[in-house]
Image (cartoon, rainbow, N blue to C red):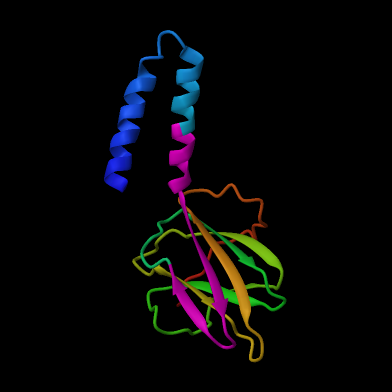
Amino acid sequence: MFATLKQKIALQDLYVGTYKASHADFFDAYEASKTIYDLGKGHHSKELHLMPLSFEACFGKKFKIGNTFTIRNHSEFGIVVYLSDDAASYSGRFAVKIAGKTELKLEVPKDFGGVFGHWLIVANPNKMDDVHVTIILAHGKSGSSAEEPGNVIPNEG
């Protein structure tokens, strides 16, 4: 289906291109709408539902220095986040604590001597309650209005 759809879009682009001289405003709006659509690929998102004392490693090797995570904790209880190269274990050291019903915007730090973590670890340290978290990874600076704590996501040390 996608191959056929791609051919049809190319044909539509060809037809709309004939309006460039006679209907310049329409052609410009058509091209701008395609550009705006393409900008939607600048982020990834993930929904997590973490049970008590559980964790999940997210976005393995999909982010770079300077990218931004917007982390929304929808639950009443706090969570912790940090970067690590070990996706299979949770240490809880050097973690940013995010309170319940809070949204934070955190930047991926500069890599100092190869100690940079390539997984975002999100953990629920609560012994009795589960949490619901939304994470948005923006390639570059995020346009989110979330609070910035003034620091970067710490690495596990």
Question: Looking at the image, how many numbered discs can be counted on the residues?
Answer: 0
Quadrant assignment, res 70: bottom right
The quarter of the rendered structure image containing the C terminus is bottom left
Residue plotted at (63% across, 58% down): 150
Quadrant assignment, res 96: bottom right
Span colored in magenta: 34-58
User: Seen in the image, is 2 located left or right of residue 23?
Assistant: left
Residue 103 in view here: yes
Residue 125 x/y as whole percent: 60, 85
Residue plotted at (36% across, 64% down): 61
Residue 39 x/y as whole percent: 46, 41
Residue plotted at (64% across, 57% down): 148
The magenta stretch spans residue 74: no
User: Seen in the image, is 83 located left or right of residue 103?
Assistant: left
> On screen, 14 above or below 104?
above
The magenta stretch spans residue 52: yes
